[in-house]
Every structure is written in structure tokens, then in C-alpha cells.
Amino acid sequence: MPPNYIPIIGMGAVSCAGYGTAVCFNAVREGRDGLSPLSVLDSGLKQAPLCGQIEENPESRLGRTVQDKTTALALCAAHEALAQVTDRRELRLGVVLATTVGGITRSEIFYRELKKEPEHVRHAAAYVSHHEPTATTAAVASCVHAAGFHTISTACSTGLHAVGMAKRLIENGTYDLCLAVGSDALSILTVRGFASLMLIDYDGCKPFDRRRVGISLGEGAGALLLASAGAAKKLGCMPQAYVAGWGASADCHHMTAPHPDGLGAQRAVRSALAEAGIEPSAIDFIAAHGTATPDNDAAEIKAMRAVFAALPPFCSMKRTLGHTLAASGALEAVMSICAMREGIIPPTAGYDQFDESVGAAPSPKTKAEIRYVLKNSFGFGGNNAAVVFSGRETSGNGVME
Amino acid sequence: MEELIHKLKEQIISTLNLSDITPEDIDADAPLIGGGLGLDSIDTLELIVLMEKEYGATVPDVNVGRKVFSSVRALAQYIHDNRTKN
Amino acid sequence: MHAAGFIQGCSAVHQSGRYSARGGHAAWEQNQQGPLDVQRKQVYEQPLPEFGKLQCADKLAFSAAAMLFGELSGIDRTDFGICLGTVYGSLSTDIRYMESLVAGYPRPAYFSATLPSSPVAEVAIRFGIKGPNRVVCGGACPGLSALDCAFGILRKNKAPAALVMAINALEAADRSSALIGPAQFTEPYAYALLISAGRWEKGLNRRFVFEGEFHDRGMTLAGDESYFLDMILAIILRRQCRIAVESAGFEGSLSIEKD
């Protein structure tokens, strides 16, 4: 195993499909439609869009109240990822958390109350400290007794960047273990914001489909516990997979629309492949960003065609899980690793009709040998992330053990 | 109509925070989006919100929006035909 | 942790005025309250009607980047990385967006600017920068975390140079929003440094060493990260300096070596 391939020794997930990695992957494996008309909050929109919402309160799973839903979801995923590590001893644990919403789910309620009733400012202290994304990270770090924590936020790509950053922090020797978490809860601000940008498909997203018109929002969290090779050995933990390479780039094009040729996406993918030390042909499947906006899906496949002489099979999980924003990169990474371990290429819920302008269709497979998977995550403002994950130990001649 | 056109120019400048631009700088028949004012697709959406807020004129989607915002005059005409406020 | 590189450009937009490596210091005009009143022509030569549209964080980052790049003509920025450390994310814009939502008409331009990464996107778009980027929010010293990320990018050869920006985009009006405690308010600022791994032909080439340890003792918010301004002054005055940093988030030093 190349020394810069960082072991993943734990994973956690929570989404509209349910709590826990296995439960979420059941939905992905089936290609289940995970969306339902938005009911967990009152968005004020005339029509409730289909969303990947989590109706079961994460606080009941945790058995206590938590400052906000984003933090609660992050904790659920983090606890699951750390479950195998019972005695950490003197190993240093870091936390990198990605979120766009953070505690805004509470601030927006507070702000509304404040407008109606200026007296409400007396309660400000309770909300003040939770507005910033760092509050979520600090809460998770404190719960897991982390030695240090970092909050990053680059829109939809940020969950995947968390995985990359965790890799760097281990490579630098800053930590022995590093938890990469992505978490976002649905909020009125986000739902109304995307609606104002006219990016939502109220009837449910249709990734790569000819009829696609927009995204479906979701909420959830994904967590990956990375360890140095030495730490994994000390803990006696068998890696579930490895983070082989991380690439990032800027489109330098527009605040909310991707570059039509996906130039930035190409850069990010090439950078990830280079770091993993592999040729494009080594990639066995692509877990696409596949948000189902007319622009993203076309640009993404165009970019992949430019990088790959033969386009690998690909899928999008956005109809099964919803677009969970900052969580998506981490959550879908966990799902991709599950797919790699099980040897399947998941179906793409919501896809039905081939689109000439995309020129390719998602191709599920019930039996596949997957050694390398590429996960893409592209954010607003043209911020692109790509991570290559590799499967377990292979012997010298490339045979999986 | 001319009064509405002038008012619209002022509202566009203030809503979109265009610095260094006065109403006299805006040609009523020149393309709004992609023209010399440096407006882009987010500005289209901002103008859609402006239309609804100030005039109760709904622009149902971005495609209609593109025609409506082809010039200030086209915009004034759309408001004239579709307004439900003021 | 020990990292070394070369500073090829720097700038600051600060309560006390504007600073840049070759231009030195320029005070604000009488009618300007501070960094958020910056005018386009003070930082960027060409006309830019969109300048007025920029939200606080975006405007500060753009202004700092514009001044820095304004002094570096003829360099190819395409592959540069951008690392941003932001104290409050985009709180000013969050408030403005929430106001618009509560009024019933959420503003799309505000929404897209509520992302803490929005300033990076603006700078990338305006200056044609396509390399890797990082955005670190909050904590006691996000600017130093961004600096650390930049060295990471250089060490891994992911980019020939990295633009590091540290910003704090709060307005005086935000004090009364109740979303920040009165004791937490700091005047807005933006600092920018362009760092390369090696010397450049005809570059500024101020050798720079960054060493120490990060640690985070709970959720402390950054102060004013004034060590950046100290470094920028040292570069402008062509002096060497060694700035010790002892904050809740980092213990170590930043040194600019002899010219």
C-alpha cells in the first residue's frame, strides 16, 4: 500500500434513509426514492418541494438535547465512525467538520422572533454562540475529546474537502486519527435561497435525465475516521478502504453555475488521480455529484469524458439521499466505499430518460470488481473537490486480498 | 411609460448596487443582461424579485425572464401588462 | 510544525488605511468610515460596475487581492491556490439575507454570498485563478490556519504559489443584530499575502518562516489577527521581524528575514 494512502478505519452515516451506514446503504443499493414533500419545517413556499428530510429527531437517538439539528446529525455520524475504537490511549484525534448551515436552523427562528418581538433580544445569548459554523465543530470535538478541530466551508464540495484535509493532517503528523465529518440540516434559509435561485425541482430531482430541471435538497451527515498506518496497527483496526488522492480547483467562472466544459472539475480529478499515482483507466466507477441541474450534469460528464478515454460506469445518489449540501461529499463517500466493498455499482434513482446533450447514462451493476472509486463534489462558486478511494490491501500483482 | 422607464432605471441601479452608473448611462433599448452593465444570471433573479416586490408582476421562470429583461423598455412593457401592485 | 517560503506580494485593507508592498500606506478619505467604504478606484484601476454589488466579505477580499495583484503585472495566476481564513464567515450577509427573507422576498444575490467561500469564488473569478482552494472558518486564528493550508498546497506541489487571505467582515450595524455579543465585535479587515515555495526572478522574495503548534482550547473567536498587519508593515518598510504569537489557537512565531 503506497504510504500516502491513508486508512479509513470507521464510518458513520445518517440520512432520510435512516440512521446508520448499513441502513443508508440499503436504500442506495436498491436505488430507492428517498424524497418526500417537505414537512419538517415551514418554508413559506406555495408548494412544498420534495426533499430528503429526516423526520426522526436525532436527539432521541442521542438521548439528549443538542444545540441544533446539524450538530445532532454530525454527532450521530461521528459516534458511529468512532464505535470500533474503544481505547484510543495516547493517540491524538482531530476533527475536520464541513457544514454550510451549522446553527442557522436556530438563528433563523431567533431572527424571526426578534423581528416580531424586539424584547426577544433578551434570549440572544442562547443563540449568539451557535450561529457560526465553528459552534458545530466545537460541540463534536468536545464530545469526542478531540485534541484539535477545524471548520471548513466551501459550499457543496466541502464534505469531500473534509476527507482530503483529514488526509493532509495525518500526513503532516498533526494527528494520529482524524475524523472528517460533513453535516447539514434543512433550513428555511437554504430552501428559500435555492428557490430564489430557481434551482429546485419541486417534483424530485432526475439526475442525468433529459427532463431534469433542478435539485432536491436533503439533510444528513457522513463521517469517516482516518488513521495513520501506525495508529491503525496499534488499534488493531482493519482498514475498510483508503483515501488515495485529493484534488481541488476553482472554476473561475460564475457564482452559481459551473463552467460548461467542466474545466475546473477536470483539474480537480486529474490532481486526485496524480496524488493516487494511478492512470484514469484504473478508476472502476465514479460516484458523481449528479445534482440534476441542467448545467451540472452535462458539465460533469463532459469533464469526465475529457479525463477518461473510456468513461467508467457512474451513478448519482441525489434522489435517494437528497442533496445534503456540505454533508453530501462525506455521506456519499461513505456510500461509495460501501459499494466498493460489496462490489456493486448502485442504481441512480430518478433517472429514466437518456439525454443526448449529456451523452451518457448511469450504469448500475450488481457484480463488479472495484478497486478504485472516484468521488466528485462540486460546489457553488465553482469550488471543485475530487477524491480517489482505494479498496483493501492488494498483493503485488494487483489481486485483492 | 417614460416615467416608469426612468423609475425602473433608478430601481435597477439601487437594487443591484451598481456603482459609477446613473440613470442617464442606461440605454432603455440596450440589452440588460450581458450588456455593458455587467449583469449576469444572478442579477436576472434579483430583478425577478424586484418585479414581484414592487409591482406584483410575476416572472414564472428564467426563460421568460430572459425575454422580459432584454431591455428596460421590454421590462416596463411587461410590468405595464402584468402589474398587480402600485 | 515548521514551514518556510517567499512572500511575493502583500496587501491590507484596515481601519488605519490601505497597505501594499510597493505602494506603502494610504489613508482613508475624510468621508470614509473604514475598510467597508473602500472605493473601487482606490484598489482597482479598471471600471467595475459590479464592485458596488459585492457583499462585505467579498468586497474586502476583492480589494485586498486587487491591490496585491495590481503590483504584480505579467505573472500567470492561473494555477495559484487560494486559502481563506474567515472569522465570522459571512455574518453581515447572513443578516442581510435573513432580513430579506423575513420581509418576504429573499434576495438570491445575498443568498449566494452567504457562503463563507463566496469571497474565494469572487477572487478566483475576477483574477482568473483556478488552483486548489481552502476556506477555514472561525476558531481562534483562521488566518493562520489558512496560512498552514497554503504551505500544505506548496509542499505537495499542487500549485506554484498560494494567495492567503485573512478577513473579518463585520459591519458596525451588525453590532445591533444580537447575533454577536458586543464584546466580540472587531473592526473589519482583510489581509493578503502571496506565498511561493521558491524564489522568483524579479520577485519580492522576502523569505518567511512560520513555526509553532496549533491547539484549540474550546470555541474562542479570533481577535484581530494583527500579526498579519505587522508582517505587512515589515515588508513595506523592508525590515526583518519576528512576531511571537500566543493565542488561544496557536503558539509560535512568524518571521520575515533580512532583505
Image: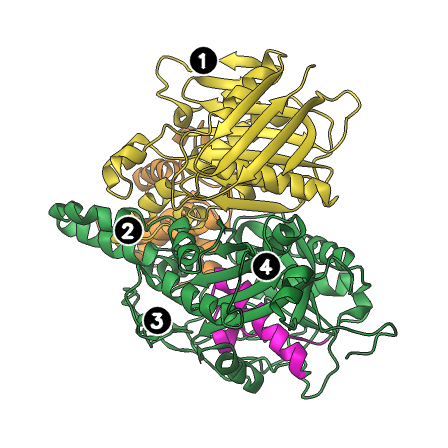
Tell me which residue sits at (44%, 28%) in the image.
C189
Q: Which residue is mark 3?
A: A62
The chain under label 2 reads: B
Figure quadrant of residue A56 = bottom left
Mark 1–mark 3 Cα distance, whole angstroms, equals: 54 Å
Q: Disc 1 marks which residue?
A: C27
Question: As displayed, is residue C2 above or below residue A108?
Answer: above
How far is disc 2 from disc 1 in space, using C-alphas? 40 Å
* Amino acid type at image mark 1: Ala
Q: Position of residue C162 (x, y in %)?
A: 65, 37
Tell me if A20 is positioned left or right of C95 in this view: right
Visual hue assigned to chain C: yellow
- Give the residue drawn at x 42%, y 25%: C35
Q: Are there few (<14), some (14-19), or many (20+) residues within 10 Å of tag 2? A: some
Which amino acid type is shown beneath numbered disc 3? Leu
Magenta-tinted stretch: A313-342
- Quarter of the figure with the C terminus of chain C: top right
